[in-house]
Amino acid sequence: MSQIIGFVGVGRMGANMARRLHDCGYRIAAIHDINHAAAEALAQELGSTACPTLAGVTAAADLIFTVVTDDAAMHGIFADSGDSLLSVARGRTFINCATLAPATHLAIEAAATAVGAHTLEGCMASSITQAREGSLYLMVAGRPEVFERVQPVLAKLSSHMRYVGPTGEAAKVKALVNMVMNINTAGLAEGLGLATALGLDLTLVREVFAQTGAASRVLVTDGEDMQTRDHACFFSAAHAAKDSGIALQLAADLGLNLPLATATRAQFERMVGAGLGELDKSGIAELTFPGRG
């Protein structure tokens, strides 16, 4: 398999994935981002080319990672007219890493197949540090033969990788992961907020939580940050709101009512409405701790 790689979307995750593959000896030939300055800076760092067009990335690389914001952005980069990754894309493989609705991944696969290209979902359940270190948890979906071809590259990005089935299946699992994570985050913020109102020592409370049924991965990653108000962004509140919405739409399509997920999305949407959407998801504590907000 060719080792000529391109990246579309070099924000917090995409840039660090590109750095990791560069460190592993892969040639990062082309970089594109709507933030042209970010693309230029990363290209200079990696000895790559900042492509002003999407078609330029497709022309320069055989394996293209996309790490974009949302479904609309994804449809935009794979447009059926104008500047698009699908221009002269025959034989190319696209690994799509954004958290999107399953239907979007299926639509992109169909569009790519129509021009002789291939796609794979590479859904990530990790954050910036893991992207840089190559220890992402990857949930992969798509055609098995495509997965087999790109597995050596994905192995350099991940410490845990699960192939979960045909296109769309990884997006479903990722939506569930983020839905439950977001509910846990909101619940932890309420618990610590109530502890503060009761005059309890939050360090003690977190230690007790860690040894009881209140323990969670979110407690490890976000508990101290909620206490100290350190909301440097690893996974933004805006993304939490978006991703909760993906899961809720899947539930609605099946006629299911998910009250906890609904309430959690409302909390993260409150953050976005208050101008706090670019804080880390731990910033939801700003809505629940007394005297904040």
Image (tube, rainbow, N blue to C red):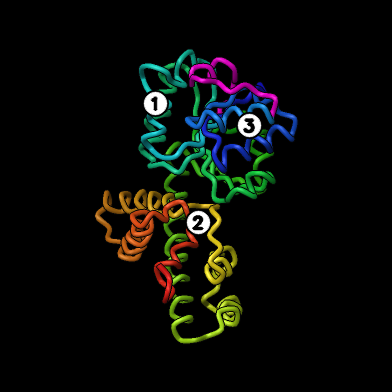
Question: Circle 1 sits on which residue?
Answer: 110
The magenta stretch spans which residues?
Answer: 46-64
Residue 113 is situated, as x and y percent measured from the top left of the image, at 43, 22
Quick one: 58 or 204, which is closer to the camera? Answer: 204
Task: Say if 115 sits above or below 17 in the image.
Answer: above
Question: Circle 2 sits on which residue?
Answer: 280
Which of the marked residues, 3 or 2, is nearer the chain's N terminus? Answer: 3
Amino acid type, label 3 = Leu
Residue 119 is situated, as x and y percent measured from the top left of the image, at 49, 29
Residue 222 is situated, as x and y percent measured from the top left of the image, at 55, 64
Question: Circle 3 sits on which residue?
Answer: 42
Residue 143 appears in the picture as rendered: no
Quadrant of the rendering where the N terminus is positioned: top right
Amino acid type, label 1 = Ala
Which of the marked residues, 1 or 2, is nearer the chain's N terminus? Answer: 1
Residue 278 is situated, as x and y percent measured from the top left of the image, at 46, 51
- Residue drawn at 36 percent across, 19 percent down: 80
- Residue drawn at 35 percent across, 38 percent down: 103
Task: Say if 293 sits above or below 9 in the image.
Answer: below
